[in-house]
């Protein structure tokens, strides 16, 4: 018979009973190899302890991963909430700015409000307020009126002032006339549908925006010669250039006056502070006075078709600030400066 104790095997012969000699051998073997039995048990215990520690470490790692995931979720939700809060604040600022701009525009359109009225420059709160500027829209040129009158001399003076040759100016005038007339017959140097080779061109109606002028053949020459040409025109102007509101460059180009004389008229007009529509302004009272300052010959009646001293339309520019948000609203209204408004011709914002 063979019996295993730990790592030691002890052989015992089978017999009817264990004799004294067998018992002694058994005892000696147990004394010699009992430590092996204890060692085997220690190894098993160590294995169990290592297994327990491994399981505990894996559980701790899983807990750390869960905590990291929760932190990421909380951070993501917080970021989304912050974006929503910022968006709500921006919407509130935009809404508030729109309310203030409409209020300022209504004040500016009141017939009792003058351009230098303190109500046009108001601080509503610590970080809220508006500034309103009013200028005569007739300080700009209405291209439709000039083309309707076929005022070729005035258009030539304008284009020549921009550096175009006489031939280029005449060609462009013919093409602009073909653009706004109702027929499909091209002028000598004009351009109708065959020249454009594009459906719907030209429009054969007056310009409805200044950007439409850029579609006329030949305007690329103007773009190259004078890129700021758009700032000279307005389709809402009456067609009578207001000498008190127009810029010296425009006045010199339209009338053919010396630019220095036009600048001199402007200096007298704005007064000592150099600002339009303030208390020290000295506007030209009549066309005779304006012609004398400009040094232009002829009677006022001869110039009355293109020049005047008051605007029939005005532009109101409202600048609003709400916190760090700035908003501008512009409107062109019918009615002279200081006389209220009868109708809004155009309105835009940015």
Image: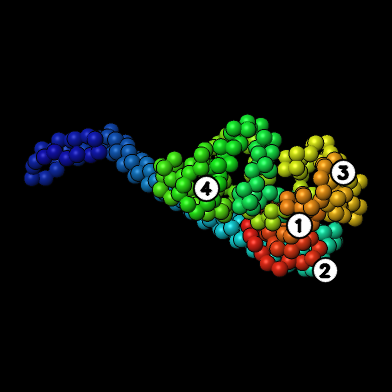
Q: Which residue is mark 1?
A: 311
Of label 1 and label 4, which has the lower sequence position? 4
Q: Is residue 150 visible?
A: yes
- In the rendered structure, find residue 221 and report the number of the disc placed on it: none
Graded by Cα atoms within 10 Å as few (under 14), some (14 to 19) or many (20 or more), the crowding at tag 1 reads many
Label 2's element? loop
Residue for point 87% across, 55% down: 285
Q: Is residue 341 left or right of residue 208?
A: right
CB atoms at circles 2 and 4 under 8 Å apart? no
Residue for point 61% across, 56% down: 86
Disc 3/disc 4 C-alpha distance (Å): 37 Å
Residue 97: percent from the left, percent from the top?
Answer: 68, 61
- In the rendered structure, find residue 179 and report the number of the disc placed on it: 4
Disc 2/disc 1 C-alpha distance (Å): 17 Å
Disc 3/disc 2 C-alpha distance (Å): 31 Å
Graded by Cα atoms within 10 Å as few (under 14), some (14 to 19) or many (20 or more), the crowding at tag 3 reads some
- Looking at the rendering, in which quadrant would you find the N terminus? top left
Graded by Cα atoms within 10 Å as few (under 14), some (14 to 19) or many (20 or more), the crowding at tag 2 reads few
Residue 218: percent from the left, percent from the top?
Answer: 54, 37
Of label 1 and label 3, which has the lower sequence position? 3
Image: 180 above or below 331 = above
Of label 2 and label 1, which has the lower sequence position? 2
Image: 167 above or below 278 = above
Disc 2/disc 4 C-alpha distance (Å): 42 Å
Q: Is residue 299 left or right of residue 14?
A: right
Disc 1/disc 4 C-alpha distance (Å): 28 Å
Q: Which residue is mark 3?
A: 293
Q: Which residue is mark 2?
A: 112
Of label 3 and label 2, which has the lower sequence position? 2
Residue 232: percent from the left, percent from the top?
Answer: 68, 45
Residue for point 52% across, 38% down: 189
Of label 3 and label 4, which has the lower sequence position? 4
């Amino acid at each position: 018979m063979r019996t295993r104790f730990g790592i030691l095997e002890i052989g015992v012969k089978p017999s009817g009973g264990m004799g004294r000699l067998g018992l002694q051998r058994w005892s000696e073997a147990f004394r010699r190899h009992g430590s092996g039995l204890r060692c085997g048990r220690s190894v098993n215990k160590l294995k169990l302890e290592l297994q327990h520690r491994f399981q505990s470490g894996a559980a701790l790692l899983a807990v750390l991963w869960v905590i990291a995931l929760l932190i990421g979720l909380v951070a993501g939700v917080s970021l989304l909430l912050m974006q929503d809060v910022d968006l709500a604040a921006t919407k509130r600022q935009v809404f508030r700015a729109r309310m203030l701009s409409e209020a300022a525009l209504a004040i500016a359109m009141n017939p009792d409000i003058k351009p230098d009225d303190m109500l046009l420059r108001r601080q509503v709160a610590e970080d809220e307020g508006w500034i309103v500027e009013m200028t005569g829209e007739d300080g700009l040129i209405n291209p439709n009126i000039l083309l309707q009158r076929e005022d070729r001399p005035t258009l030539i003076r304008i284009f020549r002032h921009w550096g175009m040759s006489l031939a280029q100016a005449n060609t462009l005038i013919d093409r602009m006339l073909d653009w706004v007339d109702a027929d499909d017959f091209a002028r000598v140097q004009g351009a109708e549908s065959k020249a454009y080779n594009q459906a719907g061109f030209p429009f054969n109606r007056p310009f409805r925006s200044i950007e439409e002028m850029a579609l006329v053949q030949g305007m690329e020459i103007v773009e190259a010669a004078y890129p700021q040409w758009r700032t000279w025109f307005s389709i809402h102007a009456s067609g009578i250039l207001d000498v008190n509101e127009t810029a010296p460059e425009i006045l010199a180009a339209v009338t053919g006056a010396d630019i220095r004389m036009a600048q001199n008229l402007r200096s007298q007009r704005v007064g000592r502070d150099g600002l339009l529509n303030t208390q020290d302004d000295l506007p030209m009272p009549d066309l005779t006075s304006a012609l004398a300052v400009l040094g232009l010959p002829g009677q006022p009646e001869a110039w009355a078709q293109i020049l005047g001293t008051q605007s029939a339309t005005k532009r109101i520019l409202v600048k609003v600030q709400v916190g760090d948000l700035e908003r501008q609203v512009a409107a062109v209204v019918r009615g002279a400066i200081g006389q209220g408004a009868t109708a809004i011709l155009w309105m835009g914002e940015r």
